[in-house]
Amino acid sequence: MFTSGPSGLSFGAVATTSGLSKATVQSVFASREGMIEALLERWLQQERMAFEQRAGETPTLRDRVRAHIQTMLAPPEDANSRLAATLAALASTDSRMDGVMHWYADRMGDFSAKTDEERHLRMAFLAAEGAFFVRYLARVPICTEQWQEIAHDLQDFAAR
């Protein structure tokens, strides 16, 4: 909807795109941060559904990490770019990032690891997050072929 990402997100832009009045949009979202939080929450819900489908009903830590890698690295590049920009925009405000914190807790708990396997899986998870942010937030140019190779390598690493 917004090709310029969160920087182009305004009450006026949402009103124009949705066909609503600016006053209506302002009454729904109290602030620009509220709009960004709503975008992020919508993404989190969609992502959560994709993750749960991949992880299964009672996933082990390994299942959760592998499903996370598949879910995070699979979407189209533009969707991930918008997500990274939304996270950066939200992090630069006084907004609370409770939804993101809950999302991480669902995936990895408190990041504690008692066994070698848990430490290994924690590193696979963090490597996937790092790869995501390197490509989409730092905007390091990684072509599709390399990105697929990285995703495959991370899946292999998590499977060990």
Image (cartoon, rainbow, N blue to C red):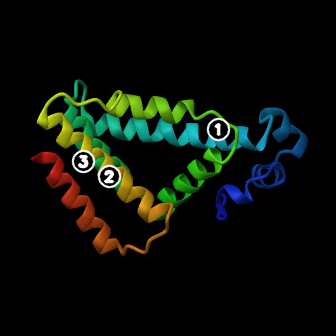
Residue 128 numbered mark, or none: 2
Residue 116 numbered mark, or none: none
Find residue 111 and report its image quarter. Answer: top left
Residue density around tag 2, few if under 14, some if 14–19, many if 20 or more, within 10 Å: many
Q: Which of the two discs, 1 and 3, labels the residue nearer the N terminus?
A: 1
Q: Is residue 11 left or right of residue 76?
A: right
Q: Is residue 73 above or below residue 115?
A: below
Q: Is residue 76 left or right of residue 37?
A: left
Residue 38 numbered mark, or none: 1
Task: Kindly identify the amino acid type of the residue bearing the numbered disc 2.
Answer: Ala
Task: Kindly identify the amino acid type of the residue bearing the numbered disc 1.
Answer: Ala
Residue density around tag 3, few if under 14, some if 14–19, many if 20 or more, within 10 Å: many
Who is closer to the viewer here, 86 or 93? 93
Mark 3 highlights which residue?
124
List x then y, in percent, for residue 50. Answer: 37, 41
Report, in whole angstroms, how far the alpha carbon at label 1 lies from the one at label 2: 25 Å
Residues tagged 3 and 2 counted as in contact (Cβ below 8 A):
yes
Q: Which of the two discs, 1 and 2, labels the residue nearer the N terminus?
A: 1
List x then y, in percent, for residue 53. Answer: 30, 36
Residue at x 58% of width, y 35% of height: 97
Task: Kindly identify the amino acid type of the residue bearing the numbered disc 3.
Answer: Ala
Report, in whole angstroms, how far the alpha carbon at label 1 lies from the one at label 3: 29 Å
Determine the secondary structure under disc 1. helix
